[in-house]
Each structure stands twice: as structure tokens, then as C-alpha cells.
Image (cartoon, rainbow, N blue to C red):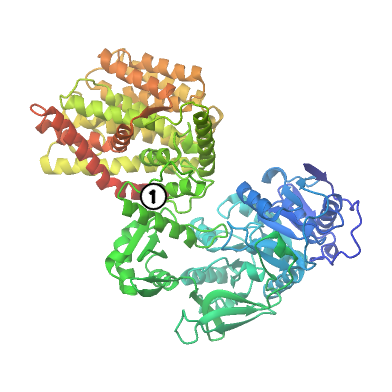
Amino acid sequence: MTVLLPGRPPRLPLAPSRPDPVLDLARHGRRTALWTDHGTLSYADLAGRAAALAGDVLGNERRLVLVEGANRVGSVVAYLAALQHGHPVLLVPHGRDDRLAAMVEAYDPDVVLRPGGAAADDALDPMDVTVEVRRDGSAHDLHPDLALLLSTSGSTGSPKLVRLSRDNVRANAAAIASYLRLGPEDRAATSLPLHYCYGLSVLHSHLLVGGGLALTETSVVDECFWDRFAEAGATSFAGVPYTFDLLERSGFAERDLPTLRYVTQAGGRLAPEKVRRFAGLGRERGWDLFVMYGQTEATARMAYLPPERALDRPEAIGVPVPGGSFRIDPVPESAAPGTGELVYRGPNVMMGYAATPVDLSRGAELVELRTGDLAREVDGLVEVVGRRDRHAKVFGLRIDLDRVERLLADEVEVRCVAHDDALHLFTTRPRERRRVAARAAQLCGLPPGAVVVHVLDALPTTANGKPDHGALLRQARLHHEAAQAGSTGVVPDTSAPATAEAVRDQLALVLGRPDASVDDSFVGLGGDSLSYVELSTRLDRMLGDLPPGWHTRSATELTHLAGRARRGAETSDNDGGPHRRRGASVDTSVALRALAILLIVGTHANLLTIPGGAHLLLAVAGFNLARFHLTGRPRPERLRLGLAAVAQVAVPSALFIGGVAAVTGMYDAPTALFLNGLLGRDSWTVDWQFWFLEALLWSTVGIVGLMAVPWVDRLDRRAPFAFPLGLVAAALVLRFAWTGVEAGATERYTLGPVLFLVVLGWLVARARTLPQRLLAVALTAVGTVGFLGDLQRELVVVGGVAVLALVAGLRLPQPVASLAALLASASLWIYLTHWQVYPHLEMDHPFLATALSLLVGIGYARLMQPLTRRLARLTRA
């Protein structure tokens, strides 16, 4: 239910035995506590709202309260309502229904509090909080000291929680406030999420001293973030390593921030050169950089590097926070003198872990924390040099993976994992691939074959901004399994129910996205038409018939739908009905691409005479452009993905055509640059052989450029079918104005007249109802009949578009489906290369000419696959 609570005294008195509040909000009175989209909120108002929510909903008996942590008024009030009034809080991320459901199932909270509405709708009076009271009273035995339950940074997907007491929270907030010299005039912009212990510590430390928070969910790359920063007169913000990457890219160094007093960094190691760079920038601009070290198990912070030491000791984590102390214990993993496991002692050390609700009754079990980090002390400052669990044996050699990363960081940023007697390195720099592999092999004493380098769009991080080595290890395992099984990879047997994790693994492997989660979809991860064929084949074998629009569904949704279909088939079989049909389901666009390239090559090689395949392929290309690139993504992402699609085709094609031209002199220079239609002859020459690629590329460039215009982008989103319908009408006007009813010998291959086919594919992809689909087919007939001067050719185009519009998928025998997938994935490259193959055999051996043309194209596709994937990564990045 949704409860609207104005700031008023609680209706129910709190129990006399209620423990003292963790934070004394009321003593700060009318000072401003929060800056929001709708104005400000004072400490008195904040305390009143928290008390009202506690009195109206939570009552006297202590209860386990799950709160969704977002940088919103509703979340802050809900959190304080429970924390301040003695109810243990289980804090989870906002907007992650899977995590919410997992925690509800694991811990059975008594009450669930969620912020109501969107971030921009945080009304101050009344305030919207969504409340689910799951029972009267509590189902749990809650220890009197228990105040807060947080996921550890390394277990965000599991029910393992850190148990924190009121004293833990108070002590760490006071320590942070002490070394940052916080006072009532300090105001922090919420650059980190509230559910993350680092972001939560910013809230605690500022509310402890009467400071303020500028609430925002925007990123540091958004102007809205800095608008809120300036409006509140903020004096600080916090960042994880990725935040500082964003700051560098967004022109932070040039920003005028007169109120900024300090910046904090934690959540993972920031490269020493970046520490120096930002510390130097701060010294120039009048603010300090505090590099900090902590873990959730220590209520956030254990150490900080005094700002004056950041330039000369950027690799250090510094000194213990006030009230804490360190020691270094020798461990077998490290033989280096003075290096061992870092152990922390202080009042902020957690009570212990929880794995089940029974653990919530346990008291404090620890007085010190074994961090798992390897460290040493130099000149009074502690330096972390690695992790105890980041050692691996490869070829019998013990390798410190963190040390390898640090040594390679001077040349290029990499992440390292070890799997199956191989060292796997991940980087975003394809040009450095060989050099990094050679350097790593030299450092570790490994043979070159034991080092595998993977190039990614971006190095994955956890929700807390730390390197996600777990995702990389999973990706290494998938690559190993694929290599063991051959180039087609491991495809699970459909006799066993597939899991969402298995579907996620296929997304990660095919798209090169180790950060893929069960909530991601093919389109959401930046999939394109080249990877679509491979993934659809894998998932069809894993899940059975894929539903329409599967590429927009998450791994979890696909698994759920597959399970439901499987149960339906079993029920049908038990009732005597047919179970799953034989063969494999093939997406219609995939089948048409395969059929079209067969018709093209077979017709050119004199094996058959069914022209029209290339014009049909233009419509299929427009269909895929709309499905994979003109989606609901933000406009900049549309532009990047569209350019990636162009680069993946243009560069390998230009290399091939240019190479043939250089060796044989067969083609003119404009042909390799796809300018023959503009600069070539009006009569047919061999330079016209690549008209299809030219039309495909320039039409894609034009559409992507058009959609980059903000008002056009908005119009397309408001009218997803009407907008391409209008473009089809304009393209048909251009076609008839250019050619009349029948096109000339080269006009039928020129961009202007054939543009309508690409836009028609776009229209088909947007058609949702039967009348819309039939309209698209009718417009195809209007534009095509008479255009090509050959009724058979025209019927191939119209019929193909009709099948594309009206049939979602085709069921084919398994061998035929596999062949169709192979031909479809290589169709562009077969078209590109077949001109150099079939002419030598077409007169005497048409079948051999056709077969060899297909094989050469498939081979070129395999040869170019690493290049096309790198181009896609570079363009998307």
C-alpha cells in the first residue's frame, strides 16, 4: 500500500525501552538536512517524518524492516524511521526486483518500505512511501544491539549479510567526521547510492554533525548533478575508481566549483598516477583529495591517506581512522619481508555475518577484522599490495594476480584471472593485445600459449564500482569451454531445463560482455544482426522455440517463458497430444538472409535464374537496423551502435575491394570508398557489382544521422509506426520522381531509388498489428512492381517482405536450420567475395561455382570476425 505521511508527531508512543537514536537529528533544528528536486527539508522536518512513519507503521515492537535504498527523500525517511527508532534495517538496492525478492525469501522481513514514485516526483508534503506490512509484530528474535544489515561487497548476489550494531554505525560516522573535519556547513552531493556502505557512510557522517546532503540520482557526467551541487553549495562528493574515469572524460578539471572543499575516493584501488593527478588538481583549485580504504565489515572506513601525502605516496591507503588500529600478520601466501594479512581492530568492526534469519539473534562475535588483504607498512603508511584469494597456480607456478595487474598498469589497464592452467587477461585496448600477452608471460615465467588476452568494450565492475573479477572468471570459463567444443561453442542439451544463468552465459560469450546479468537482454547489451544469428541458434537449442521479440527480453524472462512452454508441452504429451515438433525454429529474417544469398550466388553462377535477392536483402537490412539500433535506448547510444554497424561492414569491405583493386586493377578507387553511384558511370561496369553494399552503408549512415537530430529522435519515439510510415511515403515519392514506374539499367541499383526498400524494412519492424503489417506489404508492392522491369524479380522482393511481415519464424529440419544460420551470418561477406570466385567456373561447373563462392565467403567472414568485433567495441566505446 502507499502511505502519505506529512511531517507530524507519531500517533503511537515509542516503548520506554526503546534504545537511544543512532543519530540525534532533532538537536539540529531548522538547519537544512536535504536539498531535493522540490526544495529543502530541515532536520526537524526530517525527524518528524521519520517519527511519523515509525509511529504509524512500525509500532512499538522491534521488527525487521527491509528498506530500498535510493537517493530520494522517501528512502532516507524510511531508513531513518527504522534506524532511529530501534528497528533493524535490511538495506537493498532500489529498482532491483530480483534482489528484493531474494532478500524477502531469505530473511522474511516484517515490513518492506520502498520510495514511491520516480526520482523527479519526490514531493515534500505529503511524502510518498510505499509500505508493505507483512505481519503484525515480528517473526524474528532480534538481538538488542542489531541495527543494520548490509550485503558485503563480494556477496551482492547472495543472502550473506553483515550485521552492524548501533555502536558500529555511530563510531564509524564519528571517525569519518573527525578526519574529514566535518561541520554543520558541510554539504555532500550523493554521488553514490544509499544502499552501498560507502554512500551510506556519507549520509551518517553528515547527519551526525548537522551537515546537509544534496540528493540526486544523476551521474557526475550529467549537468543536472552539478546544478544540484551548485544549488546546495555542496562542499564534497564521493567517488569509486569508475567515478574518476567519468570525471576525466567529462571535463571536471575545467569546472568552476568555488564551494568544493574535498573529494573522497574508496571502493577499490585508484591507480597511483590518477591519485597524483587529482591530488595535484585539487591543490591547484583549493580542495583536498582523501583516498580511503574500507570494507562493509568495518561499517565502511578503516583507513585514510592524509591529503598532504597523496602526491608522494599515492599507492598507500594511509593511517587507521580515529579509534582504530592495524597490525600485519604473516601468511603463507606472502614470503616478502614485512608483508602479510592486514588485520583491523576498532569499535566499527561488525558483530558478525548472517546467512539465515536465525543469525539475527546472535550478539557481537568479533573484536577484530581479518581483511583478506595483503599489506605492508612503509614510513608509517599502510600499503595494500594484493588479496590473499587473488593467487593462482598456472603451470605449477604461484602467481599473484593483483601484482600482475599492477605491473602491467604502467602500460595498459588490465584485469587478470586464472582458469584451467591459463592466465586470462582482459583489456579494452585491442592494439596492445600481443604486447600485453608477451609482457605477462615474461613477468610470470609462463609459456606464451598459457596467456590468453580478451578485448572487451569495458572492464566490468560490481554495483559498488569495484573490479568484477567474478564476472571475468566466468567469461574465461566460457571461452575455455567454447574452445574445447570447437568454434560453435558449448550448447546445452534441451532435455535439461535451462537456467537464467545459462542464458546469461550465452549472452556474455557471444557479445563479449562478462558484465551481463540475468536481467539483461540481447538488445540491451548492444547486440547486432551479426551476433543475432549465432545467439538465436544457441538459444533455440537451449530453450526450444524462441518467442517473438526474444531479443528484447531478459535472460530471466526467456527462461521463464521456456519453462512454461516446456510444461505445456509435457501436459500436452501426457494428454496424448503432440509434444515438441522436430527440427529447429529459425527467425524469418535469418531464413530470408540465407535464401537471398543463395538466390544471388546461384543466379550469378548460372545454377538457377531467380533474381531479386539483393533487393530483398535491403529490406531485411532495414528490418534489422530498426530492431537492433533504433530501439528505446538514449539517442547517443543509438548513434554509437549505428556507427558500429556501419564500421563492421564498411572497413572489411573496403579492405577487400581495395586489395582486389590494387592487385588486379579491376575496380576504380571510388568503388572501394563506396562512391561509385556518385562518381561512377551511368552504364553498367564491374564497379557496379557492389551497389548493394553502397546502398546499405549510405542508407544506414543517413538514417543514423537523421536519428541523431534531437527533435527527430523525439518524433520517432512519440510515433514509432507513423514516423517510418512518413519516411516510406517520402522515399516512394523520391523513387517515382527519380525513375518513373520502371527504373533504368543502373537506376535500379542507385541509392536514391532503392532507399524505399531499407525504410520499408524499418516499417515492418515497427508494425505491431495485422493491418499495419498488411499496409507495409502493400507499400512494398506499390514501390516494387514495375520498378525492376522483371515480374519474377519483383515478386521475390514483395513475397519476401510479406513473409518477413507476417511470419515470425520458420521450422526447419535441424541440418537445414544450421545451414541457414551459417549462410545468414556470412551473407554480406559471401556477396562481397563471390564476384572473384564464380566467374572462373560458371560456364562449365555452375554448382561448383556456387558452392565455392559460398565457402570463400564463409571463410572471409570467419577471418574478419575478430576485426568486426573490435570495430564494434571501439565504436561503441
Q: Identify the residue at horizontal 15%, vertical 36% (top origin).
A: 836
Q: Is residue 639 visible?
A: yes
- x, y percent for residue 19: 84, 66
Asked which quadrant contains residue 161, the reply is: bottom right
Q: Identify the residue at horizontal 30%, vertical 46% (top origin).
A: 865
Camera-nearest residue between 460 and 397: 397
**Above/below status of 609 relative to 597:** above
Q: Identify the residue at horizontal 50%, vertical 46% (top origin).
A: 499
Camera-nearest residue between 437 and 510: 510
Camera-nearest residue between 301 and 700: 301
Camera-nearest residue between 762 and 844: 844
Q: Secondary structure at mark 1?
A: helix
Q: Identify the residue at horizontal 57%, vertical 85% (top origin).
A: 380
- x, y percent for residue 871: 34, 48
Relative side of 499 to 396, left or right: right
Amino acid type at image mark 1: Arg
Relative side of 355 to 452, left or right: right
In the picture, the quarter occupied by the N terminus is: top right
Give neighbour class at mark 1: few <14, some 14-19, many 20+ (Cα, 10 Å).
many
Q: Is residue 234 visible?
A: no
Q: Which residue is mark 1?
A: 873
- x, y percent for residue 669: 19, 39
Total numbered labels placed on residues in the image: 1
- x, y percent for residue 162: 66, 65
